[in-house]
Amino acid sequence: MRNGLPATALRAPGAVAQPARAAEPSPLLQVDGVSLEYRTPERVVRATHRVGFDVHAAERFVLLGPSGCGKSTLLKAVAGFIAPVEGEIRLDGHRVTAPGPDRIVVFQEFDQLPPWKTVHQNVMFPLLASRTLGKREAAERALHYLDKVGLARFADVHPHQLSGGMKQRVAIARALAMQPRVLLMDEPFAALDALTRRKMQEELLALWDEVRFTLLFVTHSIEEALVVGSRIALLSPHPGRMRAEINSHEFGLHSTGGAAFQATAQRIHGLLFEHEGAVAS
């Protein structure tokens, strides 16, 4: 305040007031300098070293790297199953210290569905176990998400009657029915054949277009990362470190044969393995 007037009232003659700049939304998920370790019978192994990235609401964020770079371990830490030895993970500004229904994981294994429960019961189960909803509401929500993944007519069958891709769709419906803040997917399509994998990528993206959930997705496939992700974090070979971040909003299933897609894929390959190339040369 100057001469009894607020600062905003003091402008040069003829000056035009500038609109206030909208504050950028805070990240939903923050991974801040996270190092993770695990024990073997012989020693302690560092899986990741001071990894950091932010994920915003409704973003499709991919962790990409070679086998053994710690990306799945990092996903488990975001889920709350593993505590960092350094750094911290925050969801909505609150430190993650344990698993919770705000972060649901879909793994690549097909046997994650109890075989004695029907498809409908499998999707209902976490809603009832967590006391998120009563039985009637859980049944309605389960059918809603089964419909979203195109499996409503299979609600009364058992998992052994489904193909691998269909089982993964049930797992995705079960996860989304919990309406998590972040959906965590650990190489969910890696065990599928190429055609089914492509179909599942299409269905995941179509589902995201409709529901706009926040996705943290792990893969070791460069093509899948570019197709599924809007942003990609590249992790170095073991121990995983942040090598680069790539914006991939422009790419999708329609662009896999294009020159720009292939050039970006080659660039990512070079970034991921540049150290190995330098050693070899």
Image: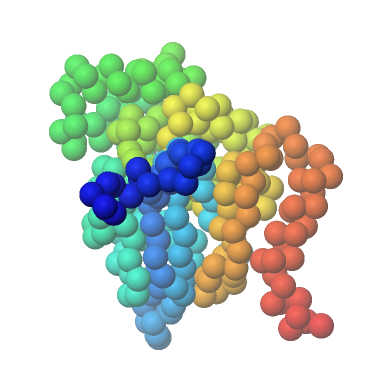
Q: Residue at x 84, y 45 (%)?
A: 259
Residue 137 position by quadrant: top left
Q: Position of residue 10 (x, y in %)?
A: 38, 47
Q: Residue furthest right?
A: 259
* Left/right of residue 264 with respect to residue 49 in the rendered view: right
> Does residue 107 show up?
no
Front one among 9 and 45: 9
Q: Residue at x 67, y 66 (%)?
A: 272
What is the basis of the colouring in this image? Answer: rainbow
| Image coordinates for residue 123, horizontal then vertical, percent | 32, 29
Q: Please, which residue is most extreme toward the bottom here?
A: 42
Residue 158 on image: x %, y %: 38, 26
Visible residue check, residue 265: yes
Q: What is the quadrant of the C terminus in the image?
A: bottom right
Query: Number of numbered discs present?
Result: 0
In the rendered view, would you say 49 is above or below 125? below
Closer to us: 241 or 39? 241
Judged left or right of residue 236, residue 140 is: left
Of 100 and 25, the residue lying toward us: 25
Please state if 269 lies on the left or on the right of 149 as rendered. right
Question: Quadrant of residue 68 in the image?
Answer: bottom right
Residue at image x 62%, y 38%? 197
| Residue 20 image point, x, y percent | 42, 41
